[in-house]
Image (cartoon, grey):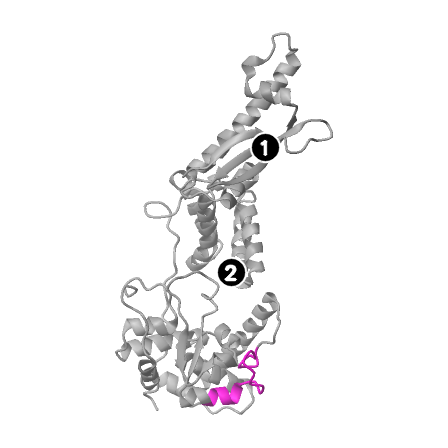
């Protein structure tokens, strides 16, 4: 069903001038909404605007011109509303209003879209993603201080990439800067500001965002064993770095942010169950809680590093405090990760692991060692919390807890 639109003379309330406002009336599924046209007319004036052929011949030229101008404005608004409705796959008043009141000039401004998106992300607590968009916008502004959607062509993107590479930026950085831009374009297309057919430069046979070569960051079982058996002085960052690295490795590759956000209520008997911070605020259909079996080794780490007050809503580890702003939370997690990385590198050097070990190695090592030990790709994917497994989504549901307990044996074959 399509909405019905009409310019009406709203005579429900008389203005001081004795005139009534014109409004655009939209009717859909028996719901009517009215939108201002910003023209006030008398009853006689409205009749003549609706029927220009009835304008008396003796009417002066200025009045005729004014009546015709009002008629043109009304026709233009009806035409715009009709065009918006025709372009909508499914009508909603919210989206109709958004498109109706767009300032077309400002709506084409890429940087205004960036600013609005960054503001929404910060309001939602997505500080890290907002920071990525901010960096992307700043880089583009250096290359092109003013930028409209129609300026973003295949040639523009190639020149932008060429400019970044000439400055010594890596292919990976190019990708990091361009993915937010692509997302902004997709949003503008969804809102009807630009058309995909005429103004979308990404994709096959057009411009493809480059991706850096994936450098493997996995340790062998022997190298993991050396880190695991490192003797650290209790209560020091050496002990913390070792413990949290091993917790990440044994705990399904859990990252430092998710470790920091764990609460006592995430402990469910012999398991830690949680949703990844990366996916819990999205609508991804494939995401599900991650379950980590609390082996004796993980239990020992929890005992050493946990906070003393075991209330359900309290953080499990002393990394964050309650009621932090998103910016402060991000800052503390970054500082914590930085310290773990600093000391795990020192530990790796001390035990003869000649790799630039970071917490990222724990996640990669978890997946790599399980794969080499014969664990199925489906089990590894679920354990890592991946939410988009195209090849397995048709039958992957959930592995039982006994199967997940077996992970610990494979991961600890060095002991």
- The answer to whether residue 108 of the structure is visible from this angle is no
Classified by dominant secondary structure, the portion drawn in magenta counts as loop
Tell me: residue 188, above or below residue 348.
above
Q: Nearer the viewer, residue 58 or 132?
A: 58
Question: Which residue is painted at 31% across and 74% down in the image?
Answer: 379
User: Which residue in the rendered view is the most extreme toward the top?
Assistant: 58
Quick one: SS at disc 2? helix
Q: Position of residue 175 (x, y in %)?
A: 43, 56
Tell me: residue 11, above or below residue 153.
above
- Tag 2 residue: 129
- Tag 1 residue: 23
- The answer to whether residue 19 of the structure is visible from this angle is yes
Q: Position of residue 46 (x, y in %)?
A: 60, 22
Span shown in magenta: 300-319
Residue 35 sits in quarter: top right
Q: Count how many numbered circles sit on residues in the image.
A: 2
Q: Position of residue 279 (x, y in %)?
A: 45, 65
Question: Which residue is painted at 55% across and 48% down in the image?
Answer: 141
Circle 2 Cα neighbour tier, 10 Å, few/some/many (<14 / 14–19 / ≥20)? some
Q: Reading the chain from its start, which is encountered first: label 2 or label 1?
A: 1
On the rendered structure, is 275 left or right of 410?
right
Tell me: residue 3, above or below residue 410.
above
């Amino acid at each position: 069903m399509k909405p019905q639109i009409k310019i009406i003379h709203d005579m429900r309330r008389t203005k001081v001038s004795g005139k009534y406002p014109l409004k655009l009336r939209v009717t859909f599924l028996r719901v009517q909404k009215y939108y201002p046209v910003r023209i006030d007319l008398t009853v006689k004036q409205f009749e003549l605007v609706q029927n220009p052929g009835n304008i008396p011949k003796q009417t002066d030229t200025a009045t005729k011109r004014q009546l015709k101008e009002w008629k043109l404005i009304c026709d233009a608004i009806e035409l715009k509303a009709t065009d918006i409705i025709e372009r909508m796959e499914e009508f909603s008043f919210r989206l109709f209003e958004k498109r109706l009141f767009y300032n077309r000039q400002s709506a084409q401004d890429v940087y205004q879209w960036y600013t609005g998106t960054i503001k929404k992300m910060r309001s939602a607590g997505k500080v890290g993603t907002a920071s990525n968009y901010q960096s992307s916008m700043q880089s583009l502004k250096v290359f092109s201080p003013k930028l409209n959607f129609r300026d973003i062509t295949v040639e523009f993107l190639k020149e932008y990439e060429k400019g970044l590479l000439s400055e010594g930026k890596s292919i990976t950085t190019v990708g990091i800067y361009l993915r937010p831009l692509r997302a902004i374009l997709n949003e503008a297309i969804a809102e009807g500001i630009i058309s995909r057919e005429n103004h979308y430069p990404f994709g096959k046979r057009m411009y493809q965002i480059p991706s850096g070569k994936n450098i493997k960051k996995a340790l062998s079982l022997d190298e993991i064993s050396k880190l695991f058996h490192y003797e650290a002085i209790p209560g020091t960052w050496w002990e913390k770095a070792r413990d949290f690295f091993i917790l990440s490795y044994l705990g399904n590759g859990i990252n430092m942010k998710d470790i920091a956000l764990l609460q006592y209520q995430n402990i469910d008997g012999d398991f830690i169950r949680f949703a990844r911070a990366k996916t819990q605020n999205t609508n991804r259909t494939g995401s599900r809680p991650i379950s980590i079996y609390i082996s004796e080794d993980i239990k020992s780490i929890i005992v050493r590093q946990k906070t003393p007050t075991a209330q359900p809503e309290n953080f499990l580890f002393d990394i964050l405090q309650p009621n932090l702003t998103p910016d402060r939370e991000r800052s503390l997690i970054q500082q914590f990760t930085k310290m773990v990385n600093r000391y795990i590198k020192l530990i790796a050097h001390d035990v003869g692991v000649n790799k630039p070990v970071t917490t990222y190695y724990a996640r990669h090592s978890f997946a790599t060692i399980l794969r080499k030990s014969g664990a199925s790709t489906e089990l590894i994917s679920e354990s890592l919390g991946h939410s988009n497994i195209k090849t397995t989504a048709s039958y992957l549901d959930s592995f039982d807890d006994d199967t997940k307990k077996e992970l610990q044996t494979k991961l600890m074959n060095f002991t």
